[in-house]
Amino acid sequence: MKSLSWYCTLACILALTCFGGGCSRIVVTPAAQEATAEYLKDPTIQALFPEKVKNLDLAMIDEQVDLPEFGFSWEGYRGVYQRGGQQLEVLVLEKMGRDEFKTLHDAVKQTAIENGDNADRLRLNNASYTFWSKDGRVYRFFPLDGDVIVFRTQKHVSQLPLVKDYLQKRTTAVSLAAN
């Protein structure tokens, strides 16, 4: 049996190939599905990624939480939810403090300016912020329980109900796991 990291590497190569080519849909391979099954044996990972978010199903989990489009990297986990033509990526940036969160915000803003994007599309809302890029991607950055959750999708996907459902399910799962 091949190692879990080999499967993750293969899944990442396929995902990055798709991403680099402008494709918004991540292709979930059998190897990625097998790796996801291994991740889901860990109750901590189960609490991070509910089986469904609204009408989207959890398709895969990996450790690809870097945001190369903003020149930012961190450690954590990514869950990819899909159904039909919709996709939501949920990146859990683990143990990210206030200073690192500000650094991420500054990286998003600087990248937007450098790319000729409208920095006004970066909106603060209480403790979170949202960025709508000119290429059609939508990002919502949300601090939660010492982590930062990044929701990444396309503008044709109604992301706010997905975000709310994810946050509600995660909060419930973490509360249940603590008891």
Image (tube, rainbow, N blue to C red):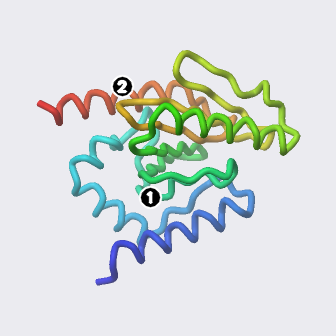
Question: Amino acid type of disc 2?
Answer: Gln
Q: Which residue is mark 1?
A: 63
Q: Are marks 1 and 2 in contact (CB under 8 Å)?
A: no
Residue occupying image coordinates x 42% and y 52%: 77
Q: Residue furthest top?
A: 126
Q: Which residue is mark 2?
A: 168
Left or right, residue 86 beside residue 178: right
Q: Residue furthest bottom?
A: 1
Residue 1 position, x and y percent, is 28, 84
Residue occupying image coordinates x 40% and y 28%: 167
Q: Which of the 4 image quadrants contains residue 96?
A: top left
Among numbered discs 1 and 2, the one appearing first in the sequence:
1
In the drawing, what numbered circle is on residue 4?
A: none
**Marks 1, 2: nearer the viewer:** 1
Above or below — where is 135 with respect to 158? below
Residue occupying image coordinates x 38% and y 40%: 52
Residue 155 position, x and y percent, is 69, 35
Q: The C terminus is located in which quarter?
A: top left
Give the SS element for disc 1.
loop
Above or below — where is 171 with respect to 134? above
How crowded pointer 1 is (Cα within 10 Å; few <14, some 14-19, many 20+) is rated as some
Q: Which of the 4 image quadrants contains residue 106?
A: top right
In terms of depth relative to the viewer, which is nearer, 119 or 14?
119
Question: Amino acid type of disc 1?
Answer: Glu
In terms of depth relative to the viewer, which is nearer, 48 or 105?
105
Residue 27 position, x and y percent, is 55, 62
Residue 145 position, x and y percent, is 35, 31
Q: Which of the 4 image quadrants contains residue 34?
A: bottom left
Give the SS element for disc 2.
helix
Tell me how far mark 1 sits from mark 2, CA to CA: 23 Å
